[in-house]
Amino acid sequence: MSTETDLSHIPGFKRTMETEVESHDGREGRVLTFIKSRIDGEPTPIPVKTLLDLMDEFSFQEDFLISIGDHKAKVFTDIIHEKKPKTFVEFGGYLGYSALLVAAAIKEYASDGHIWSVEADKDCAAIASELITLAGLDHMITVVLDKTTDAIPKLQGQGHFKNVDMLFLDHDESLYKPDFQTCLATGVIGTGTTIVADNVVRPGAPEYRRYVRELKGVQSKGVRGLITPGNFEDEFEVTEIVNADEARQ
């Protein structure tokens, strides 16, 4: 009996597993075309749920997208509702999936909340901006086209924020630790900030995870989430800064 997983019902993911290519091959532009074709004639703003459902459908049936996906979206929404951030920064905005998700959640309790979504790829940033406009959320989400190390001091210098309530790490896992350290040293994250890091199991961020769990002045734990389609086990690392001064020592 074969032990191979049958992926025929999720052809988009099956193709990615076969080719080992999961992004930046033109699929980002194709998902925008796909979404526009499905909402053609619909009044704007388009509901966030509609846009996210279409992105998930594309990921399942057309080409896998490296967005957080539907299962993690539910887990992340629960975290947002629990922590209730108003100022939110994410590193690795990609096509705007998580920014849209978070904005919809924050709107439920804070009309003045804001998300800064930092994305280094200009094409991805442009697509994210277009989807955000379709959702009518330009007033809540700012897409920042820049590298993380350059974006934060610029945003601080422009007076957009001194520190943030929540930081979401969803870019290159090898940058999680140094970017966390930079944000801690500059005061972007401080006492009371929650840091959520994606993909700490798959593909993995062991150095970052070990670092935050051993760091004084913080509390950190894993929260289960599935990579969909495929239902691969993964976790968010959710870190609370209890005492920033102690963490900076």
Image (cartoon, rainbow, N blue to C red):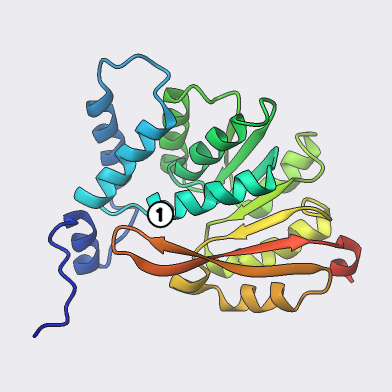
In this picture, is 75 found above or below 7?
A: above
In this picture, is 207 found above or below 241?
A: below
- Residue occupying image coordinates x 24% and y 59%: 13
Left or right, 77 with reference to 248: left
* Front residue of this view, candidates 120 and 214: 214
Q: How many marks?
A: 1
Tell me the quarter of the picture where residue 113 sits.
Answer: top right
Left or right, 26 with reference to 224: left
Tell me where residue 164 appears, x and y as whole percent.
Answer: 75, 45
Mark 1: amino acid: His
Which residue ends up furthest to the bottom in the rendered image? 1
- Residue occupying image coordinates x 61% and y 53%: 168
Dividing the image into 4 quarters, which one contains the C terminus? bottom right
In this picture, is 70 found above or below 46?
A: below
Near mark 1 (Cα within 10 A), the count class, few <14, some 14-19 or many ≥20, is: some
Q: Is residue 62 visible?
A: no
- Residue occupying image coordinates x 24% and y 62%: 16
Q: Is residue 220 visible?
A: yes
Tell me where residue 150 appears, x and y as whole percent.
Answer: 67, 49
* Front residue of this view, candidates 156 and 69: 69
Tell me where residue 69 appears, x and y as whole percent.
Answer: 39, 51
Left or right, 229 with reference to 222: left
Which residue ends up furthest to the left in the rendered image? 1
- Residue occupying image coordinates x 43% and y 42%: 95
Helix, strand or loop at label 1? It is helix
Dividing the image into 4 quarters, which one contains the N terminus? bottom left
Tell me where residue 26 appears, x and y as whole percent.
Answer: 28, 47
In this picture, is 223 found above or below 206?
A: above
Q: Check disc 1 and report the residue beneath it.
A: 71
